[in-house]
Amino acid sequence: MAKQFQHSEDARRELMVGIETLARAVGVTLGPAGRNVVLDQDFGPPQICSDGVTIAKEIELPDAFPNMGVQLLKEAASNTNDDVGDGTTTSTVIAHNMVREGFKNLAAGANPMALKKGIDLAVDAIRGEIANMSRPVEGREQIGQVAILSSHDPEMGNLLADILDKIGSEGIVTVEESKGMGYEVEYVEGMQIDRGYLSPYMATNQERMIVEIDEPRILLTSEKISSASELVPILETISA
C-alpha cells in the first residue's frame, strides 16, 4: 500500500482529531469525582473502568492519521504508568492541552523550534516547583487516603494501608491473582531468593525433597559458577 502524506496545518489537524478523541475518553475519569468508562470486550461482558492507561490501550481509530495522534498520546500515558504506576489520566490531560495550545501558536506563526525550547524551559521550571510543593506520605492515614483514591475501593485501600504501614517504605509487595473471592495477605520476614537447590542430593529431607539447614554458611562470589562440581572443594572444607 502506497504511503500517504500530510503536511503542516493539514497534518496537525488530522493528528488533533485522534488526540482529542483519546483525551475526551480518558479525561472524564480524572480526580476523585471522575466518571467511569465502559469498554467493549471481544469476549465476555463490557468492562467498567476508570484507569487512564487501560482505557487508552483500547482506543484505535480506523483512519491512519488520526490514529497516529491516538498513539502519540497513548505513549505519554504509558510512560507515566511505567515510571510511577499512576497518574496516567493526568498525563493524558496535560499532554493534550500542551499539544492543543502548541498547535494554536504554530497556526499563529510561532517558530516551531523556539516553541519547543520554551516548552522545555517551562517543564524544567514546573518540575522544580512541583518538587518544592510535594510532601512525603507519612503514616497509615495518609497512605490509606492515597490507596483509596487510586483503587476506588475503600476495602482495598485500607488493606494496602495496613500492609504498607507494616512493611515500611523499603518493603516489597508482590500482587498475585486470588483463587477465591476475598483478599489474602502473607507476610514474609527477611529475604527470599527465587531459586531452588542446584542438586537433589542436597535435600536434607528425601521424602519431601526439601533442604532445611540451621545457621547455614553463605558464599558470596562475583565469579561465574558453571557446575555444582566447582563448589565441591568449598563444601568439603566447611563440612570437615
Image: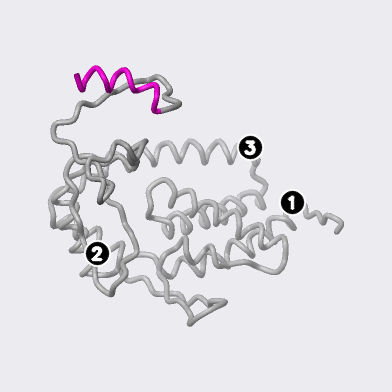
Q: What element carries label 3?
A: helix
Q: Mark 2 points at which residue?
A: 148
Q: Is mark 1 on a helix, strand or loop?
A: helix
Q: Earlier in the sequence, mark 2 or mark 3?
A: 3
Magenta highlight: main SS: helix
| Neighbour tally class for label 3: few under 14, some 14-19, many 20 plus, Cα within 10 Å | few
Is 6 within the magenta? no
Separation of marks 1 and 3 at Cα, in angstroms:
14 Å
At 55% from the left and 67% from the top, the residue drawn is 58
Q: Which residue lies furthest to the right in this view?
A: 2
Separation of marks 2 and 3 at Cα, in angstroms:
42 Å
At 29% from the left and 23% from the top, the residue drawn is 220
Q: Percent from the top left, x then y, of residue 41?
A: 53, 76
The quadrant of the picture occupied by the N terminus is bottom right
Which picture quadrant has residue 238?
A: top left
Q: Percent from the top left, x then y, of residue 16?
A: 63, 60
